[in-house]
Image (cartoon, rainbow, N blue to C red):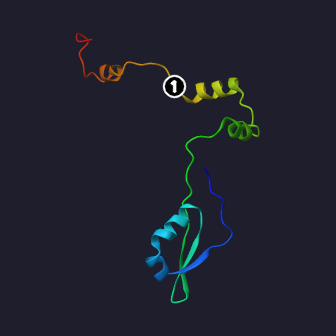
Amino acid sequence: MSMPEPSSASEISQRDLRNRSAEIMDALERGERFAVTRNGHHIGDLVPIRRRRRAVSRAEFAAMSRGMPRLDDRKFRADMDRHVNDDLYDPYDRAYGRGEFSEEQR
């Protein structure tokens, strides 16, 4: 669930932040923003964090996927065959090749 970005921030003083912190934190949870001042000078902003969604709905995924180029599975497989060696091998073959084991142990 994403929160809409408020158009403007409420100005609060450092003293307000200290004295009304619980109230201000509740407002942050509701999506409000605050411009914090000290002695009348803007020193920072309090903004709600964006919450990450854990899942995308099927409809959203379909809408995003419509603009994607189609994948040619034959070209993809050929590309994978060119760049990935998926032959199975015995990891001891290299050790035998270097003479680390005698042929009798094999």
Give the left or right position of residue 88, taking residue 96 as reference. right
* Image location (x, y in percent) of residue 32: 59, 67
**Residue at 66% of width from left, 66% of height from top?**
6
* Image location (x, y in percent) of residue 52: 55, 50
Quarter placement of the C terminus: top left
Q: Above or below — where is 12 with respect to 72? A: below
Q: Amino acid at mark 1?
A: Asn
Q: Quadrant of residue 82?
A: top right
Judge by depth and name the residue closer to the eye, 72 or 34. Answer: 34
Judge by depth and name the residue closer to the eye, 103 or 52. Answer: 52
Judge by depth and name the residue closer to the eye, 15 or 61. Answer: 15
Q: Above or below — where is 93 with respect to 2? A: above
Q: Quadrant of residue 74?
A: top right
**Residue at 75% of width from left, 36% of height from top?**
69
Mark 1 secondary-structure assignment: loop
Q: Quadrant of residue 93?
A: top left
Give the left or right position of residue 57, taking residue 63 as reference. left
Question: Which residue is the extreme one toward the top?
Answer: 104
**Residue at 55% of width from left, 89% of height from top?**
40
* Image location (x, y in percent) of residue 23: 50, 70
Q: Which residue is mark 1?
A: 85
